Image (cartoon, helix red, strand yellow):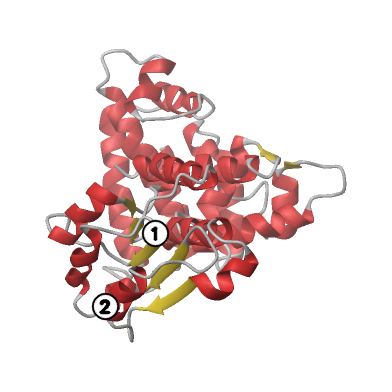
Amino acid sequence: MAASTQSSFNSVRNDILQRRFKPIYLFMGDESYFIDVLTDLLSDTVLTETEKDFNMLTFYGVDADVNLIISSARRFPMMAEYQLIIVKEAQNLDKFELLDLYAKNPMPSTILVINYKHGTVDKRKAVVKSILKTGEVFESKKLYENQIPAFIQSWLKERGIGIDEKSAQMLTDYVGNDISKLIPQLQKLEVSLPEGEQRITSALIERNVGISKDYNNFELQKAVISKNVVAANRIVDYFDKNPKENPMMATIAVLFNYFSNLLECFWLPRKDEQSIMNALNMKSAYFVRDYMTGLRNYNAQKVMEIISDLRTFDARSKGVDNVSASQGDLLKELVYRIMH
């Protein structure tokens, strides 16, 4: 389901860029990034700077009157084709449902943008049904973590910048699926590119973000998958000496995601690269090799034991049945149990 967020976003974005405006937009959901981008795009596209003086209004849900919003939306623009009205933080708007009175018959010369963050409006409500008929409803869902590398590549591609799969995964492991934290890191990397360079590398990330290109969750996972005990121990030792930059919780999440997916691969009728890509909804074949290697080096029974161990050590890292073991000691024991 979350995969549709990016495609729906692109569809709405393209319509706005082509000036195929809807009279009313409801942007709602838990991922604020997409809501803000579409709202800013409408703000930049609908009116010229001169037209904004008389034809752009912004309301804030916490102190706005829904009747005033409706009456403002029913006015005609002044010396412009449209007027633009933006309602921010609409989740705090009192009597939100009254917007249905306007949504049933919106003014074609008004573009009303409603930002409803940190949740959604019940789609069974009349106001949502009316907006679906006359305007646009976009639900901005959080992306899953395995979709973040593709988002990183897409965001950078729009700016003419490339990035390899390893580097994209390094950033994902470091930030997770919190786009509000990810975007500043991407912007930092963008401005850090040497003149004439248009590709982000792991070395650039190491210099500017603070993630080691050799000692990170991506490299630890590779070592575990290939059963490279020396490399895994070297990385775990580095994590033990740098706990703030390498929290055990993040490492467990990365390993849990991999082994959960690997377990699914064991039940596939065919275990070729294409079958694995389809089963795991992967867009690139780059990481399929990790699962092919995992299928050779682990069996289903061992993977189930590993998943159980990951859950146990996650609890122990949070203090459950653990009196004195440090995060480093726990991680060393966990990786030993996985690989032996």
SS label for mark 2: helix
The front one of 266 and 168 is: 168
**Is 39 situated left or right of 234 in this image?**
left
- The residue lying furthest to the bottom in this view is 63
Q: Estimate the x, y position of residue 117 in percent, counting from the top left.
A: 34, 67
Q: Amino acid at mark 2?
A: Val
Disc on res. 306: none
Q: Estimate the x, y position of residue 222 in percent, counting from the top left.
A: 53, 36
Tag 1 residue: 31
| Quarter of the figure with the N terminus | top left
129 versus 271 height, above or below = below
SS label for mark 1: loop
Question: Of callouts 1 and 2, which one flags the residue occurring earlier in the amino acid sequence?
Answer: 1
The front one of 241 and 295 is: 295
**Is 304 situated left or right of 49 in this image?**
left
Tag 2 residue: 66
Number of numbered discs present? 2
Residue placed at 50% from the left, 71% from the top? 56
Residue placed at 35% from the left, 65% from the top? 114
Q: Estimate the x, y position of residue 314 in percent, counting from the top left.
A: 34, 59
